[in-house]
Amino acid sequence: MLTEIRHYPLPIAGRSSEGTGREMVTNPYDGSTVASIAVAGHDDMERAIAAAVEVFPSFSRWPR
């Protein structure tokens, strides 16, 4: 049975990034491939960290 394997890009600061490659996600029960995910590279990590630093002040004011 052939099924389409869904690909999940990296969500960084409201945008999708394909990263530097892909990693396959397998079902531990039968070893079948269930999806692929983007692998973050250095630039992706830098963008994610910069986005987190930018929004931190507004999130730190949320009620607890």
Image (cartoon, rainbow, N blue to C red):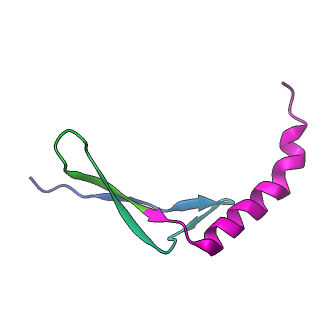
Out of 23 and 7, give the one closest to the viewer.
23
6 vs 43, left or right, is left
Out of 62 and 40, give the one closest to the viewer.
40
What percent of the width, then of the height, locates residue 41? 56, 71
Question: Considering the image in quadrants, where does the C terminus appear?
Answer: top right
| Farthest residue, direction top | 64
| Farthest residue, direction left | 1
Q: Against 23, is 63 above or below? A: above
What percent of the width, then of the height, locates residue 25? 33, 53
Q: Is residue 40 magenta?
A: yes
What percent of the width, then of the height, locates residue 55? 82, 52
56 vs 9, left or right, is right
Which quarter of the figure has residue 49? bottom right
17 vs 26, left or right, is right
Residue at image location 82% in from the left, 56% down from the top? 53
Out of 21 and 15, give the one closest to the viewer.
21
What percent of the width, then of the height, locates residue 15? 62, 64
Q: Against 1, is 23 above or below? A: below
Q: Majority secondary structure of the magenta segment?
A: helix
Residue at image location 16% in from the left, 43% down from the top? 30
Residue at image location 39% in from the left, 68% down from the top? 22
Question: What range of the chain is rendered magenta?
Answer: 38-64
Residue at image location 62% in from the left, 69% down from the top? 44
Total number of numbered discs in the rendering: 0
Q: Against 5, is 17 above or below? A: below
